[in-house]
Image (cartoon, rainbow, N blue to C red):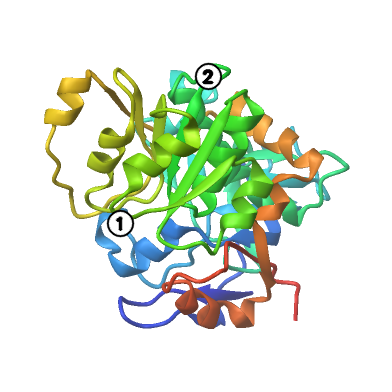
């Protein structure tokens, strides 16, 4: 099969041949209909060591596809099923796995492999898509569930004033869920205005530039200091910026993947008695299911800006290292 392969830092991905996967007893092989390019994929190719990547490696965890082969023990799926994939693969037997929360399994691994024509996953990672959701659009289920988990972690109440730092895909989907779950104001801040219209389309009520007036701008857009600030970028200094913006006894949620550490002064957080919580992954049952249901309305699909074939992946992947108007790119291997 053809795949986009990562070999080493500083070298673009390459298109090459990989062995076709064969399923183990509890596994299935999917023909990949779509795989989203995630910001964490860019992080992985810049600094693979924290992620345990061993080259040659095929990236891609935002996967949707069709079942084309099944292991002998698979009973809940059949060939031809169209599925979205939760990329956290746990042992399948511990309490966390049985409760639908494999991200908390001590043996959890985050699978890749979606930048290819076929991918091997455990059957328990798959969820069948509704008839009225296009298979390729199912690749959005994973980032949708990540954003939903963040909003639920915040314990947001209806009528809340919400601010989001970062207008990337996760920040935009946090806005989508915040409004869907009853937030009154949702302000997004970013370094540029590329995603302003898309943010408003997905549920934001205001958009601010992230500059020296960030705290004041968010308060103006929210009708007062926000109750909750989501940090969805993962850059040094943004947890502190969020703490400065949030209201007294408000909540800051760390969602962005910040590699290499951070430095911030906790005095503002302490003086506000602010809450700081972090959010990673999602619950496979409830949250992943809600994400798939949300795709039935067609709203989250506004995130998609490009659909590309495998041959274009190396070029587009390098382009995404520079901030542009592109938002979510779906790799669809069947495309020319």
62 over 267 or under it: above or below: below
Res 154 seen here: yes
- What residue sits right under mark 2 in the picture? 99
- What residue sits right under mark 1 in the picture? 52
Give the quarter of the image for residue 41.
bottom left
Give the quarter of the image for residue 246.
top left
The percent position of residue 281, horizontal first and vertical second, equals 46, 37
Mark 2 to mark 1 CA distance (whole Å): 27 Å
* Residue drawn at (75%, 75%) of the image: 335
Callout 2: SS: loop
* Residue drawn at (50%, 55%) of the image: 168
The percent position of residue 152, horizontal first and vertical second, equals 50, 24
Callout 1: SS: loop
108 over 248 or under it: above or below: below
Which quadrant is home to the N terminus? bottom right
The percent position of residue 307, horizontal first and vertical second, equals 69, 69
Which quadrant is home to the C terminus? bottom right
* Residue drawn at (53%, 39%) of the image: 174
Mark 1, residues whose alpha carbon is within 10 Å: few (<14), some, or many (≥20)?
Answer: few
The percent position of residue 86, horizontal first and vertical second, equals 57, 41
Residue nearest the viewer, comparing 228 with 292: 228
Residue nearest the viewer, comparing 160 with 232: 160
The reply, left or right, for residue 60 in relation to residue 63 is: left
The answer to which of marks 2 and 1 sits earlier in the sequence is: 1
Tag count in the figure?
A: 2
The reply, left or right, for residue 313 in relation to residue 108 is: right
* Residue drawn at (74%, 56%) of the image: 136
Mark 2, residues whose alpha carbon is within 10 Å: few (<14), some, or many (≥20)?
Answer: few
């Amino acid at each position: 099969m053809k795949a986009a392969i990562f070999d080493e830092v500083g070298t673009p991905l390459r298109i090459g041949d990989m062995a076709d996967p064969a399923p183990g007893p509890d596994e299935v092989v999917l023909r990949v209909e779509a795989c989203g390019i995630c910001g964490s994929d860019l992080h992985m190719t810049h600094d693979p060591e924290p992620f345990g990547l061993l080259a040659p490696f095929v990236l891609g965890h935002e996967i949707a596809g069709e079942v084309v082969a099944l292991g002998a023990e698979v009973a809940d799926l059949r060939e031809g099923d169209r599925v979205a994939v939760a990329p956290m693969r746990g042992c399948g037997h511990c309490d966390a796995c049985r409760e639908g929360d494999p991200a908390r399994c001590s043996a959890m691994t985050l699978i890749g492999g979606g930048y290819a024509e076929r991918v091997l996953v455990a059957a328990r990672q798959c969820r069948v898509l509704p008839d009225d959701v296009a298979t390729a659009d199912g690749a959005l289920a994973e980032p949708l569930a990540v954003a939903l988990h963040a909003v639920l972690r915040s314990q947001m109440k209806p009528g809340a004033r919400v601010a989001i730092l970062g207008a990337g895909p996760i920040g935009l989907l946090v806005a989508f869920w915040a409004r869907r779950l009853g937030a009154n104001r949702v302000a997004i801040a970013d370094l540029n205005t590329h995603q302003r219209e898309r943010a408003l389309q997905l549920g934001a009520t205001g958009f601010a530039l992230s500059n020296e007036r960030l705290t004041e701008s968010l308060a103006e857009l929210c009708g007062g200091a926000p109750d909750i600030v989501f940090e969805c970028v993962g850059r040094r200094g943004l947890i502190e910026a969020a703490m400065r913006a949030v209201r007294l006894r408000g909540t800051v949620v760390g969602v962005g993947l910040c590699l290499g550490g951070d430095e911030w002064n906790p005095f503002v957080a302490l003086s506000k008695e602010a809450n700081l919580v972090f959010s990673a992954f999602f619950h496979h049952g409830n949250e992943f299911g809600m994400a798939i249901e949300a795709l039935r309305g067609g709203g989250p699909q506004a995130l998609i800006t490009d659909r590309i074939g495998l041959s274009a992946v190396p070029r587009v992947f390098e382009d995404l290292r520079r901030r542009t108007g592109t938002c979510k790119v779906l790799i669809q291997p069947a495309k020319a």
